[in-house]
Image (cartoon, rainbow, N blue to C red):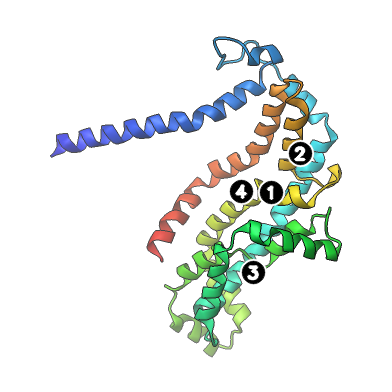
Amino acid sequence: MKKQKKLTDIFIYLILGIGSIFMIGPLLWMIATSLKDKTGVFALPPQWIPDPVRIDAYIHLFQLETLGTGIKNTIIVSLTVTIIGTITSSMAAFAFAKLRMPFRNTLFLILLASIMIPYPIIMIPQFVMFSKFGWVDTLLPLIVPGLFGNITMIFFLRQYLTNVPYSLIEAAKVDGAGYLQIFFKLIFPVIRPAVAAQFILWFMGVWNDYLAPLIYLNSPEKQTLQVVIANLKATYAIQTDYPLIMAGSVVSLLPVLIVFLIFQKQIIESVALSGVKG
């Protein structure tokens, strides 16, 4: 039995190792390409280790005004949406999980059903609505909808809160605590690990969002980082300046990669909790 288990483990590690090569390979190639010159990109055989290592692409990249504004706009959108949206999502999850209100489950099912609506269906009506508000070519269409919460986060936190006993909340009410006090002083500390994990995943999603900024933002000074990178591809691909394009992709990926490496434990726990708590 021990020998069979050892062979099984070796086979699993082999499969995972091969899979990791296919997943990490493009990332390493992107970084290597960003450190080459134009001729090194087309060298045969391909150079995985640039020779010589050049940082000209990064120097040129940071000289572009659009990069700075893209990073600034993306930070504004990402942090505003995720910080305020996490608070409203947590409060909504608490309401759906623990508040005794009429049609609670029906409203929650309607909220979940909205996930099944493809974005292209609401894309045009939403654009018309925001256009009438005068929000086109501003960051408001990217920020305002997220301030009201994230349905996936609400669902996850509600499932997590189902394990919190009602007696705990009733005891706090007997002691004179209001619902806001109960949430911020009693409930939020309990769900903080789950909130942290969902916050990280949501931040990564907002940071990498491309479609919505492409639809609503026209002026270069209003565009987010992903649109700026896409414009770099359109401009410099004709000039075969692939090191610059890859350098922009590395800069775009770096914050998300750092967040993932630092908080990967919370992300893995969020997946485990979603399977256990639900």
Badge 4 crowding class, 10 Å Cα cut-off, few under 14, some 14 to 19, many 20 or more, is some
Q: If the image is split into quadrants, where does the C terminus sit? A: bottom left
Q: Is residue 274 above or below residue 20?
A: below
Q: Amino acid at mark 2?
A: Val
Nearest the eye: 59 or 243: 243
Whether tag 2 and tag 3 are in contact, CB under 8 A, the answer is no
Mark 1–mark 4 CB contact (< 8 Å): no
On the rendered structure, is 68 left or right of 181?
right
The type of residue carrying mark 4 is Met
In primary-sequence order, the first of circles 3 and 4 is 3
Does 37 sit above or below residue 219?
Answer: above
Residue 100 in the image, given as x and y percentages of width and height:
52, 86
Does any portion of residue 97 appear in the rendered image?
yes
> Looking at this view, is 236 or 160 the one in front?
236
Residue of label 2: 228
What residue would you read off at disc 1? Answer: 211
Which residue does the numbered mark 4 point to in the structure image?
Answer: 204
> Which residue has dot 3 on it?
88
Dot placed on the residue nearer the N-terminal end, 4 or 2: 4
Using the numbered discs, state the Cα–Cα distance from disc 3 to disc 4 in whole angstroms: 18 Å
Res 186 visible: no
- Mark 3 neighbour class, 10 Å CA radius: few under 14, some 14 to 19, many 20 or more: some
N-terminal-most mark, 2 or 3: 3
For label 2, count other residues whose C-alpha is less than 10 Å away and answer few (under 14), some (14-19) or many (20+).
Answer: many
Q: Amino acid at mark 1?
A: Leu
Mark in the foreground, 1 or 4: 1
Q: Quadrant of residue 178?
A: bottom right
Separation of marks 4 and 2 at Cα, in angstroms: 17 Å
What residue do we see at 56% from left, 52% from top? 201
x then y, percent, for residue 245: 70, 28
